[in-house]
Image (spheres, rainbow, N blue to C red):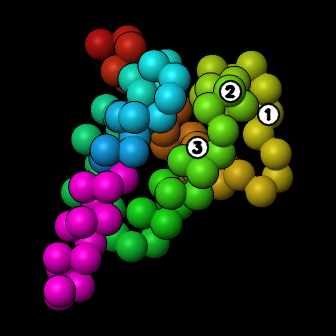
Amino acid sequence: MTSGEDIAIRRKRLRYRAWHRGTKEMDLILGPFADAHVDQFDDAQLDRLEALMDEEDPPLLTWVMRQEEPPAHVDRLFLEALIADHQARISS
């Protein structure tokens, strides 16, 4: 397998994982985000997405909805990109 094939498989897995979270609310936030961005992400950006997706759905949803502040270990810049993407989708 070439590195191009490796990243293609990784992107496909992340897209699937984004749409099959366990809670419909997070599916509808992460799924469209992954569909729109994963193909352009490099390995470092995919790492950032994976780290965010490793978080449990209930707290992640509260951060996206700005009901609670995320803990210090969360990549806030990447989370803000996810929030901005979600807000753009719901306002259009």
Identify which residue, 52 or 86, lies in the foreground: 52
Q: Residues within 10 Å of mark 2 (few under 14, many from 20)?
A: few
Q: Earlier in the sequence, mark 2 or mark 3?
A: 2
For marks 3 and 1, give the CA distance: 11 Å
Circle 1 sits in a helix, a strand or a loop, which is it? Answer: loop
Q: Which residue is mark 1?
A: 69
Comparing labels 2 and 3, the label whose residue is closer to the camera:
2
Quarter where residue 13 is shown? bottom left
Residue 79 numbered tag = 3
Give the main secondary structure of the magenta stretch: helix
First in sequence, mark 2 or 1: give its number. 2
Q: Which residue is mark 2?
A: 58
Q: Residue at x 17, y 86 (%)?
A: 1
Dot 1 amino acid type = Glu
Q: Which residues are magenta?
A: 1-14
**10 shown above or below 1:** above
